[in-house]
Amino acid sequence: MKRFRSGWSKKGHISMQGQKDHMGLKIALLCVALLLIAGAVYYFAVHRPRQQEKIPESVDPKPFVDPASGVSSEGAEDWSNLQNEAAIRYNTINDPFLFGGDIVFSSTSTASGVVLYNRLVIYHIEQGASEEISVPVKYENIAWLQMSEQYIVWVDSSSRGGGRVCAYDRQKGEFFAVKDYVFALPQLSLDGQYLAFLQQAGQETDRLYLYDLQAREGVTVKVFEGVPETSGAVHIQDGILTYAVSYTEGDLLKSRVTLLSVETGQEHTYEWGRYIYAPKTSGRYTAFLSSATGPADDIYLSENGEAPLLIAEEVVNYRMGDGYLCYTKDGNLYLYDFETGKTAQLNTSISRGMLASASGGEVCWYDVTSAKDVDVVKYAKVK
């Protein structure tokens, strides 16, 4: 059986987004998350581009080497004036995802004394009001929420294992089931009408699954057999799907990173001679987690396939937006701008944050300064 990577759980939230998100902040109700995390495998996502970027031409990237001195976020610019608090009147907010001025999340109800995250809610920032969407929950918990202009997708997951991938058409007000799963809980990625995830088909087999939410049709894009180690979720941006596949060379664990255009089918593969986790790309810039020793929790960034540079060490999680990436480190929320190479801190110096989502020019995070049993969500428009 392959070893699975777990995601961070906040107060027993089912949020699986992140690679070393076991930080231990606000972990009451942790039992719920542990049941869901136990089988987590890397999963992947795709969609048709809003604006197609060209995959870089063939290059021969040099092996990357860690700099002699560590990287820190000291001296980061203060962007905390951009932050706002979402006045959401729910005590429990799981997997908040911000898109186009709306925040979608799941919240709890109690059935027979069991706490379940089975309520689907959208908070409209401009109106300052929440809208609860009635959807059938066949199993127990709504997790891995993603949202685009027309669709919301999530995993309806059972704590006993298995579940189904679900979707909701925001314009038509229609719910529909996408696919059942038996093994590990799929991490979803959504952009526009296209949804993708990696489905575990057995102990040694994974299938990269692409689903057209508008046509309500799916296809298997890739099949992976006998992969020695998980490589994190797939990322899609500007029509380029990014994923890593690990392999062994002697006693060394390494990874190949593939950039695949979902419009043309063009592929380009990078090999940097090291194990790589959770790659993400904007076409020109490719980011990923890796480490010379220990857990893969250092962020590297490559421009057009050149030798990757170390951006930040020992991060908890990271996401990529339009022209930037965000990450959690030492209880703070940071943004790294690709063009300027500058780092900014989004939370205040007297608060603590945990990144939840980054999409386009919008970032959403938990304020975890207080240990009270009420979730606080902050957001900022950074682009």
Image: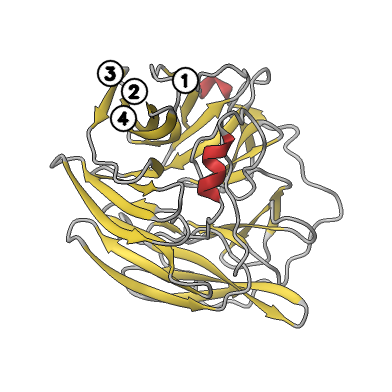
Q: CA distance from mark 3 to mark 2?
A: 6 Å
- Sequence-wise, which precedes: disc 4 or disc 3? 4
Name the N-terminal-most of marks 1 and 4: 1
* Residue drawn 47% across the image and 41% down it: 358
Query: Which residue is tagged 2?
Result: 125
The secondary element bearing badge 4 is classed as strand
SS at circle 1 = strand
Q: CA distance from mark 1 to mark 2?
A: 10 Å
Rendered view: 192 above or below 120 = below
Which one is in front, 51 or 224? 224
Task: Decide which of 18, 106 is in the foreground and name it.
Answer: 106
Q: What's the amino acid at mark 3?
A: Gln
Query: Residue 253: percent from the left, percent from the top?
Result: 71, 73
Give, as a three-letter code, the residue at label 1: Asn
Residue type at the position of mark 4: Ile
Name the residue beneath numbered marker 1.
84
